[in-house]
Image: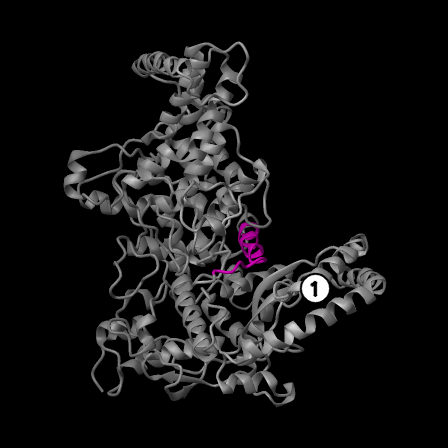
Amino acid sequence: MRRIPLALLAAAPALLLAESSTSPFKPHHLRWWAIQKVVKPPVPKVANTGLVHNEIDAFLLSKLEAAGLSYNPPADKRTLLRRVTIDLTGLPPTPEEIQAFLADDSPEAYKKVVDRLLASPRYGERWARHWLDVARYADSEGFKSDETRPHIWRYRDYVIRSLNADKPYDRFVKEQIAGDELYPGDRDALIATGFNRHFPDESNAANIMNRRQELLNDITYTVASAFLGVTVGCARCHDHKFDPILQKDYYRLQAFFANVRIEDEMVLDSEQEQARWERQNRIWEEKTRDLRQEIASLLEPVRKDFYEERLARFPEEIQAVLSMPAAERNPYQWQMYYKAKPQVTFTEEQLAARLKGEAKERYRRLKEQLAAFDSFKPPEKSLAQVMIDASAEAPKTFMLRGGAWDAPMEEVQPGFFTILDAKPAAIQKPAGMNSTGRRAALANWIASPQNPLTARVAVNRVWHHHFGRGIVGTPGDFGLMGERPTHRELLDYLAATFVEDGWSLKKLHRRIVLSRAYMQSSAPNEKAAAADPDNKLLWRFQRRRLEGEVIRDAALATAGLLNLKMFGPGVFPPRPEGTANKGAWKTDEDPEEMNRRSVYVFVRRNARYPLFESFDMPDTHESCSRRQQTLSVTQSLALLNDEMVLEWAQAMAGRLLNDAGLSPDAQIQRAFRLAFGRAPGSNEMSIARKFLDRQATLLSARFTSGETPLLPKNLPERADRARAAALVDLCHVLLNSNEFLYLD
């Protein structure tokens, strides 16, 4: 056995096995920073203590001072308020909130704002969007059919509620991996398992065995990246080329999910609610028995033919699984059964669509007669799409040659990364449940305070969204090929404190946004830029463009259109004419619904909302820890030409006329306060006046020629149409400005 330095023995005693003569791990694997135990470091001393608001500043300043640098001056109060309000809630502050903050000279003024924002229900909506990127949330399946997932929105609402309640992050993690096993009877914990349901799925695939393996692969990748910040994809076929993750580790991790099955209509109602439903349903069934029997008789030949047609698509092995008695199926066959069964189970609408001639007409008449009894039907059940175990016994898991489902090699048991824990996982079956307990074991391991990755990854992800860059610049990859932390000691301090604070995300947010680092200006500094051009030392606040969802929400709020109704199925705002796959998008008829916050906009994998797509909405087929930040002509064209943006400008102009009357100066003043949270400067006033005058002249000529330029909503009768249309153009300009689109 090779000699190991004493320092290494002290740092990683659990890893001694890895240095045996047969070990696949090398010394640099053992030194991998991310797997070392989180130890809370001492707070460093700095020269300029006046700049230290909390421990974060001490860690950052120690490196800044070592480089001969310091923080930028503080941001002005207006800028700071807009920054923290958008950061924590995804919405700009109102003019009234700005006025109140500017008028509050107390030392606690900013702290009171932070506490108000963290207590706002808007906080959960804002930060849910970040987590939904990680969870690869979507309201549809993907692939060719891209079928709707009608109840998956309950998971999105679960995330919002959890964040608003400041649910401890360790509990948040456990619920999503194994809420059904760990917290039986808890409705939210059951909904949380929808995390494992977000995989893209070709639901009509004939090769069920390969489909199962692809779904397991997706869950394995996502769990590793989302919770542990580790990429494991290449270990599917061989040992990881860079990180100390073995191919065996990949399948050990996958084995925790070997027995999962999709449940797309899990009833969430209480026993009492279900009993009431059953009583009401019996009344309806009694009154409609004859009609329903006739409909069933009419559809049965169609169902039989359809069944035989679909069954023939499957290999003989799957056909046999579908037809064999339930008692004869082994755990693997139950897996195949649950994945194949939906393809040979048909809705009444699917069957009715195949009727022809007299049968079709007869069905129509019967349905009309049946509709007369709708008042007796019970309300729809509360349903969720979740992931649970298929049985108390799991099918075997094998390492796969080349990752191919039909090339099994060595059998493996559920377990963790060998370099962290080489032993098989200790698994206990939950009492009274038809479940293996495997996912519970994994959840407890991931959410353990002793896990060196989980708290670090969570803290870094929050830091990334506050500063535009994580302490580790690759939030989903803490591996050896990912970026090294710029402030390792700070990351560990925050991770340790995060756990000490009961895994509270809100306390973490508060600590970050109250730091002097967060409160500094984004102004350029030639000396600092020369020493640290990428701002890794955080000598200034990093100016960044808003996401598409925030741009939309901010514009709706500025226009006075935003509907703050929370929760429920996804909404469908209008899409521009000519956009691809528009047929898959059914625009809401209710204008109030289409103006709800962007987190509630339906996410269709094959027809993403164009404005969001232009502004770098991630591909929902994969987990995304860090959105790309691009600058493209498409973004400018979307803001200039999208009909919805023009409608927002019309609504904003109508709001100005209502608030400021017909005075151009008052309109300009109000427009700047709504869009930017400030009064215009004298030069800006002059430019805006000239713009309105010039546009009014041009638009007057267009009205005279018979054209119909856009006018404000709710235009007063006494308003000059040309000047009113010019006001719409001014609003459109402001909504397209960098000051509106960037967080400073």
Image x and y of residue 100, in percent: 50, 24
Q: Nearer the viewer, residue 656 or 114?
A: 656
Q: Amino acid at mark 1?
A: Glu
Q: Is residue 288 visible?
A: yes
Q: Mark 1 sits on what residue?
A: 358
Q: How many marks?
A: 1
Image x and y of residue 220, in percent: 42, 71
The residue under the point 77% across, 68% down is 294
The residue under the point 48% across, 50% down is 583
Question: SS at mark 1?
Answer: helix
Does residue 672 sit above or below 538 in this rendering? above
Which residue is the extreme one toward the front?
357
Does residue 695 sit above or below 387 in this rendering? above
**How many residues crowd around disc 1 within 10 Å: few (fewer than 14), some, or many (20 or more)?**
few
Which colour style is shown?
A: one colour
Q: Nearer the viewer, residue 567 or 106?
A: 567
Q: Quadrant of residue 290?
A: bottom right
The residue under the point 52% across, 23% down is 713
Specify whether residue 120 is painted magenta. Answer: no
Does residue 109 sit above or below 338 in this rendering? above
Image x and y of residue 595, in percent: 53, 37
Image x and y of residue 633, in percent: 27, 39
If the image is split into quadrants, where does the N terminus sit? bottom left
Q: Is residue 494 visible?
A: no
Q: Is residue 340 left or right of residue 486?
A: right
Q: Magenta segment, which residues? A: 146-162
If the image is split into quadrants, where does the C terminus sit? top left
Q: Nearer the viewer, residue 349 or 140?
A: 349
